[in-house]
Structure formats: C-alpha cells, structure tokens
Amino acid sequence: MRVLSNSDIEQVLTLEDCLQVLEVAYKEYALGQAANRPRNHTMLPVEDKRYPGFHFRFKSQEGGNPSSGVWALRITSDMAGVETLEGGVKRRRLIPAAPGNTFVGLITLYSLTTLEPLAVMHDSHIQKLRVGATSALGIRELSNPDARVAGMFGSGWQAEAHLRYLFMVRPEIEEVRVYSPTSSHRKAFVGEWSDKLGQRIVAVDHPKDAVKGCQIVTCATAAMDPCFDGSWLEPGTHVTAITSPDRTTLRRELDDTTFDRADARGGEGVGAGGADRMVSGGHDAVMEKMEKIGGRVIKFGDNVNTDVIIPGRYLVSIDPQELAKHAFEPLGAEVQKRLWSSQVVAGGRNFGCGSAREQAASCLVGAGIKAVVARSFARVFFRNCINTGLLVVECPEAVEAAVDGGELWIDYAAGTLRAEGQSFDFAPYPESLRQILEAGGLIPYLAKYVLPQEKALKG
C-alpha cells in the first residue's frame, strides 16, 4: 500500500487529469454505474482552548466508479468555527490544530476487484482541484462560449484552482475581475496570478464590479452570507457557487434573488461539495444557450454503422441511459470512456449507415452527446437524430478541421460552426426542425404543439 503526501500528489496530478476523470465519474454516475455517499458532518462540543468558539468536527464521504477501479473514502478531523474579517464580513474557518500546525484530511483507496487497500493519501491538493474541476465542467457545459469577461469572488485557496480552471475551459476570457472583502488579500492574489498566468486579472473595490458586465460569475469562498445582490446579474450570466450549508453553520454564497432568477440549475453531483451552477436572466438567455451547442470532440472515420453505434442485442431497451452503457461497445472500453467524456461526435462519410434503429440516436443522447457533425449521413439516421432531439450537421470542412479531443461549437440558428479557431457555414435549420429540436424531439414537440390543437378542434 502506498502513502502519498500532498507534495507527492501535486507532482503527478494535473488539472487536465482531474477534469477528465471527474467527467467520466459524473457520466457513470448519471448512468447508474457509480455510487456516491454525500458528506456527513458530526459535531462534538469540544472546544479548542487556543481558539474560543472553534469546535471538533468529523467529516466523511465516499464513492466509487467502475472505470477508476477503486472505492474512495475521505475523512477530515477538524476544528471548525467562524471568524470576522475586514468590514465585519464573516467566514467559515478551519484551524490547523494538529501537531505542527497542520490539518488532518485523508483519502483511502480500496480495490474494487481484490478488495485490498491500495493507498492512503493527503486530501488537500486533490480537494482543491476536485472542486475547481467540478465548477469548470459546469462552466464549460452551461456558460455562453462567447463570454469574454468573468467575475471572481474569493482570493484564497479555492479561488486559485477556480481561476486556473476558468482559463482552461474558457481560454477566450479577456478579463477576470476579482473581489474579496480584504483588500490586501485580493490585490496580492491579483498580482500573483496575473504574473503566473499571463492574463488580465484585476482587483475591484466593490462586489457589484465583479458582477455587472460579467458573463460568468464564480464564487469560490468560505463566506457565511451571499457574496452579491442577485438583481445585479445581467441576462445570460452563468453563476457558480461552491458553498452550501453544513452542520458547522448555515452558509450560502448566493441570495434568494439569484435562485429565483435562474432559468436552469445544476445541483450536487458525485462529491461536488454542494456546488450550484445556473444560467440566470430570463427566456432570452436560455434560447441563446440552446442555439450554441458543443464541447469536446470524439472523432470517427467513414461508414460508421449503426451496429457499431449500438449492437443489435441491446435493442430490447429504449431507455437512452441504459443504451448508453453499450454505445460503441464493439470498439472497446477505451473508446467508450472517451465517448462518455465528449459532447460532440465528428464522423466521416455515410455516418449512421446500416439498419434504421432509432436507438442509434437515443444511445448517443443517453451518453451525453449534444451534436453529431459528419461529412455526410445516412438519411434515416439523420432524421432519427432530429426526432430524438439530437443536433446533426453536415459540414465536411468542419470535420476536416476538428481534432479528436479538441472542441467544436455550433450556432444552429446562425448556421455556423467553430473548430480549432476556424469558422464554417452550413445551411441553417428551417423553423419546423428547430422547433422539434428545442422541444427535445418529435414526441415532446407533438405533445406541446399538435395535441393541444387537436383537443381544441375536438372540443
């Protein structure tokens, strides 16, 4: 069994690695293949004499997924309490009360096959990247890809990881505005990370300045009270928050107005630590997001057959999540893992040839694929995708430019694609097909538009 310190882990665990394994874990969790027991906090009335008001707290959480091959148990033994900062702002704080002024946080890994313990590791560096990567997945999937200005609340340990991940998933960001209640901290933070990242990162003196004019707002704090007034948010803003109530005290980074204005919310996932992600600001914001679809690419060649996409022995099911477990199964487990961490399938000529099975489209939806772009399609597969609510686009030039593991974005209202810094045009969808796609497929479309008309005529 290996024993790894934070410094050991920091030398080998990259931001990219953490993001990739988390994405696979979330996909497997959504497919019912992974397990997660959320955090549990137990408090005892034992006070640290050096820090009045700080009491013992034990925290544990655990989970596992098949592709990792391990079950993980995380525990922390803390002295937790509340401190008051500059201007009367309160925040949750953990005290380094262990010998040597250290914290106690450990992760134990167990083999899913041999059952033996494999490693005991410090949790600090993993925890910082895990939370930052979870927020980054939300930003990548839900924020406007055209965002250029972001706001950041916090100038500490979690803010560092969130800032690095923000530029990883949204490299087009031109400016990040940072606010934290202690002016000396935020100025030092901005100075350090501007130099390290070579990006424009500026300190602002009022929380409103980290919200107004920002298309992405991230809260990475230990705040007790909301970081900003939700009425400041502009339509289409994506908001990330990492703080939620625990048994130490009631804590929140977002106010009721922010939640009330949100059109879409993402809740706690596998070890997400109570992260909430949302698009806020009305119907126009949601429509804009729906029209811009894309993400990471998995690329295939010519004549991909529906027997390869979903083998015939699984057609007894029509459940997209169940079918997704077997999507591209003939190509092996490694291709399946890449599929589950991708959002766009890029294919060559005659993609979807073979039988007319509709499960070839629905299994891709269940796997989290948002769009298929190909040089050309088998026509029945093309229509099955539309009827399933899956965006399909013929654009040979974009497929040529697309890189496996790169990104491709589609604005299907404007009829444009972006891949590897290049832009390509395709014939925009007619209004009738757009309505089917935006309804989520043919059956939801019929339920929304056709059945009410028939009932009205009969009535």
Image (cartoon, rainbow, N blue to C red):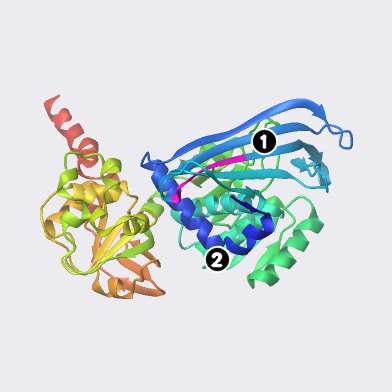
126 part of magenta stretch: no
Give the residue drawn at x 59%, y 63%: 12
Q: In the image shown, does 459 or 171 lie closer to the viewer? A: 171
Q: Which mark is residue 296?
A: none
Secondary structure, magenta segment, majority class:
strand
Residue 383 versus residue 54 in the image, above or below: below
Give the residue drawn at x 66%, y 58%: 160
Residue for badge 1: 251
Q: Residue 299: x and y, percent?
A: 30, 66
Q: In the image shown, does 1 or 24 lie closer to the viewer? A: 1
Picture quarter containing residue 346? bottom left
In this rendering, the count of numbered labels is: 2
Give SS at disc 2: loop
Callout 1: 10 Å neighbours few (<14), some, many (20+)?
some
Q: CA distance from mark 1 to mark 2?
A: 30 Å
The magenta span reads: 68-74
Give the residue drawn at x 62%, y 59%: 163
Q: Which mark is residue 173?
A: 2
| Three-letter code for the amino acid on which mark 2 is drawn | Ile
Give the residue drawn at x 18%, y 67%: 376
Residue 307 in sight from this viewpoint: yes
In the image, taking residue 260 as reference, residue 224 lies left or right, namely right
Q: Nearer the viewer, mark 1 or mark 2?
A: 1
Residue at the left extreme, as displayed? 355
In the image, taking residue 216 as reference, residue 159 lies left or right, namely right
Q: Residue 60: x and y, percent?
A: 61, 35
Give SS at disc 1: loop
Picture quarter containing residue 336? bottom left
In the rendered structure, which disc, 1 or 2, sits on the residue that comes first in sequence?
2
Residue 389 in sight from this viewpoint: no
| Three-letter code for the amino acid on which mark 1 is drawn | Arg
70 part of magenta stretch: yes
